[in-house]
């Protein structure tokens, strides 16, 4: 236990800088800021909501295409050298968005630039550093790092709504462009110095040098179980997140109340990250996954119809806990079932699946609204996706022998 606690204390600057990098990553910052911009931008240019939400397809979709390349670059050059240019590139993308003049293609170019120029900030970068520097408390360390998504969901929607109300949507995009430069760049520059090898945090050989290659993982049924379950769950999570504010305002809540619900969603992500990270260090991770995915089943059903303000907050809490669990679980399960030797490449493909969902689900969710004038069908579909994805995790079975041996050292 003492060594485990020392592992956390000895790497606290790495944890803080990686968490900050997650907050300002190209998949998180655009995703959690777009909900506050849907109404003002579409009203300014007469676009449909699905047309505007399709911007996330360019952001996350291009991120999915570049993820395997980023994984290869990290293995070759190290996470730090990939992260720093990506932070600057993400800001450039937000600057481009502020200059839109009503041409839809420019919106997509801007969000595509966030993905391409900010590719070095995707979770592959930060989780690679954590999994190769933490062994006894890997689950908790991943949970603490990935809680940056929750922090982003708490703060950024409120910040974006305030910027839009006070200064307009163009200035809001400029304000978002400053976030990576002012917050992430100095923190990552001074604090993000991961050990790139596979030795333990104390310099010992705490983790056997084992791991499947990417081609071996593709031939493993367990890898496809992981990919499909991630796809199902993240289709639900990604569809709800950017559409939560407009769906709740359509149901009669004020923009501030809707933003509060998204902030509760973000706070719940943090709870889910840390709680699940702790649990998978002590219990069978697929079982933890299946149990945690039952919460959003209840939350989605609560959002059907016209929920009260308190009901919306509770639903956001239940869905947010599951949203917090999934990315943490994907990182932990990839490292545990397939090893660290080729983790960056293997995780990058799983992340590409996640990013594809993040890009397509918001647009599909908004398309349901454009056709039916309601988000209810989307919430019902999400109920089934959460339930099926969680149950599929149970098919992963027992941990590999190498992982069990490593955890006992």
Image (tube, grey):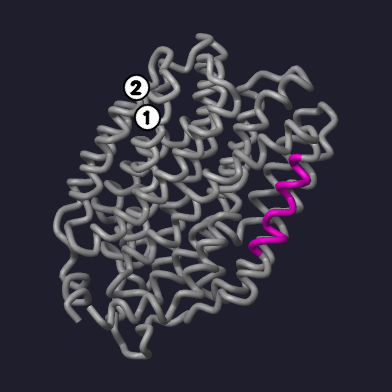
Left or right: where does residue 276 sit relative to residue 405? Answer: right
Left or right: where does residue 361 sit relative to residue 82? Answer: left
Q: Is residue 379 above or below residue 101?
A: above
Residue 285: percent from the left, percent from the top? 22, 55
Q: Where is residue 296, by image quadrant?
A: top left
The C terminus - image quarter: bottom left
Residue 195: percent from the left, percent from the top? 47, 81
Residue 108: percent from the left, percent from the top? 71, 36
Residue 363: percent from the left, percent from the top? 55, 27
The residue that appears at 41% across and 51% down in the rendered structure is: 270
Q: Is residue 174 magenta?
A: yes
Q: Is residue 212 above or below residue 1?
A: above
Q: Which residue is mark 2?
A: 302
Magenta-highlighted residues: 172-184
Q: Is residue 139 above or below residue 276?
A: below
Disc 2 is placed on an element classified as: helix
Q: Main secondary structure of the magenta part?
A: helix
Q: Which residue is mark 1?
A: 315
Circles 1 and 2 in contact, beta carbons < 8 Å: yes
The residue that appears at 42% across and 34% down in the rendered structure is: 235
> What separation in Å lies between label 1 and label 2 (alpha carbons)?
6 Å
Q: Is residue 340 magenta?
A: no
């Amino acid at each position: 236990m003492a060594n485990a606690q020392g592992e956390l204390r000895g790497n606290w600057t790495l944890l803080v800088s990686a968490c900050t990098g997650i907050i300002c990553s190209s998949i998180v910052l655009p995703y959690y800021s777009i909900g506050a911009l849907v109404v003002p931008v579409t009203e300014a240019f007469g676009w449909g909501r699905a047309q505007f939400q399709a911007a996330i397809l360019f952001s996350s979709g291009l991120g999915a295409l570049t993820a395997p390349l980023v994984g290869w670059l990290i293995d070759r050059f190290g996470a730090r050298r990939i992260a720093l240019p990506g932070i600057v590139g993400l800001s450039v993308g937000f600057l481009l968005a502020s200059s839109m003049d009503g041409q839809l293609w420019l919106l997509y170019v801007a969000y595509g630039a966030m993905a391409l120029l900010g590719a070095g900030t995707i979770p592959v970068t930060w989780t690679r550093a954590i999994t190769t520097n933490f062994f006894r408390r890997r689950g908790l360390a991943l949970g603490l790092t990935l809680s940056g998504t929750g922090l982003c969901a708490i703060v950024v929607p409120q910040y974006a709504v305030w910027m839009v109300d006070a200064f307009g949507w163009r200035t809001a995009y400029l304000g978002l462009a400053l976030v990576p430069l002012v917050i992430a760049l100095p923190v990552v520059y001074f604090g993000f110095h991961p050990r790139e090898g596979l030795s333990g945090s104390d310099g010992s050989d705490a983790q056997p040098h084992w791991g499947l290659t990417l081609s071996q993982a593709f031939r493993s049924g367990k890898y496809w179980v992981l990919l499909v379950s991630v796809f199902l769950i993240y289709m639900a999570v990604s569809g709800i997140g950017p559409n939560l504010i407009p769906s709740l305002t359509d149901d009669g809540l004020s923009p501030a109340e809707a933003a509060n619900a998204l902030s509760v969603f973000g706070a719940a992500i943090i709870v889910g990250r840390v709680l699940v990270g702790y649990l998978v260090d002590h219990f069978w991770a697929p079982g933890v996954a299946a149990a945690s995915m039952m919460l959003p089943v209840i939350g989605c059903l609560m959002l059907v119809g016209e929920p009260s303000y308190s009901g919306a907050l509770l639903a956001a809490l239940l869905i947010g806990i599951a949203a917090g669990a999934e990315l943490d679980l994907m990182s932990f399960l990839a490292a545990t079932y397939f090893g660290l030797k080729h983790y960056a490449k293997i995780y990058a493909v799983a992340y590409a699946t996640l990013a594809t969902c993040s890009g397509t689900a918001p647009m599909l969710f908004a398309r349901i609204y454009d056709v039916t004038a309601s988000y209810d069908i989307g919430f019902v579909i999400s109920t089934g996706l959460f339930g099926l994805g969680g149950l599929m995790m149970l098919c992963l079975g027992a941990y590999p022998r190498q992982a069990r041996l490593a955890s006992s050292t």
